[in-house]
Amino acid sequence: MEHATHGNKLDTRTLAMASLLAALACVATMVIKVPSPTGGYMNLGDAVVLLSAYLLGPVWGAVAAGLGSALADLFSGYTAYVPATLAIKALMAAAAALIYSGMRRRTVSLLVCSLAAEAIMVAGYWLYDGLLLGSLAASAAGIPSNLVQSAFAIAASTALTAALRRSAYVRREFPRL
């Protein structure tokens, strides 16, 4: 039996896992920070965003990814980015989970899902920075560092997910994986 939501009813286990993954996304974003030339920072939070999608599916993966990442911005003093991060990371997780499920959870799908999700991240922050700066041309300066962050997230999430899929326990507890 799949542990998740049953209809509209949320079970305690799903809520606990979403909370733990939100906390992990927050910590992964805050602990390892590599400053970017544009004033932001690169981190490993996106690896957890993608892992949340694969483990919890589109709804609860999006909740965990969005909330955890937005809290990292809030706690790190990037309050102007909290709403954007909430939406962008939630959309990333939802898209990755839907694509992953649609591709029947094959290993090659991890690359496709992560590329799609990271494209959402790069485009989302480019557009949001354009709104903040009043110029899409000026906000394009952040694209290279977001691409580097994307590459690290793709590598880390793919390796971690592939390793977790080898565990019978993990596959039993997270049938979406």
Image (cartoon, rainbow, N blue to C red):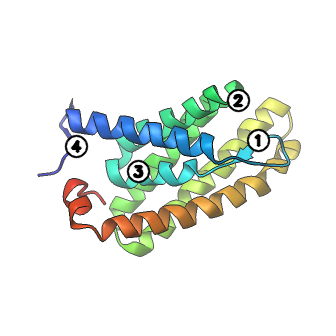
Residue type pointed to by label 2: Tyr
Residue 40, disc: 1
Q: Around disc 4, counting alpha carbons within 10 Å, would you say few (fewer than 14), some (14 to 19), or many (20 or more)?
A: many
- The amino acid sitting under disc 4 is Ala
Label disc, if present, on residue 78 of the rendered structure: 2
Q: CA distance from mark 4 to mark 3?
A: 13 Å
CA–CA distance in space, label 4 to label 2: 32 Å
Q: Is residue 56 above or below residue 80?
A: below
Q: Is residue 104 visible?
A: no
Residue situated furthest front in the rendering: 31
The amino acid sitting under disc 3 is: Ala
User: Image quarter for residue 154?
Assistant: bottom right
**Nearest to the observer: residue 139 or residue 11:** 11
C-alpha span from label 2 to label 1:
9 Å
Please give the name of the residue rendered at 61% of the width and 43% of the height, measured from the top-left corner.
31
What SS does tag 3 mark? helix
Q: Give the answer, above or below, for where 96 lies relative to 17.
A: below
Q: Quadrant of residue 73?
A: top right
Residue 4 - label: 4
Does label 4 or label 3 sit earlier along the sequence? 4
On screen, residue 82 above or below 45: above
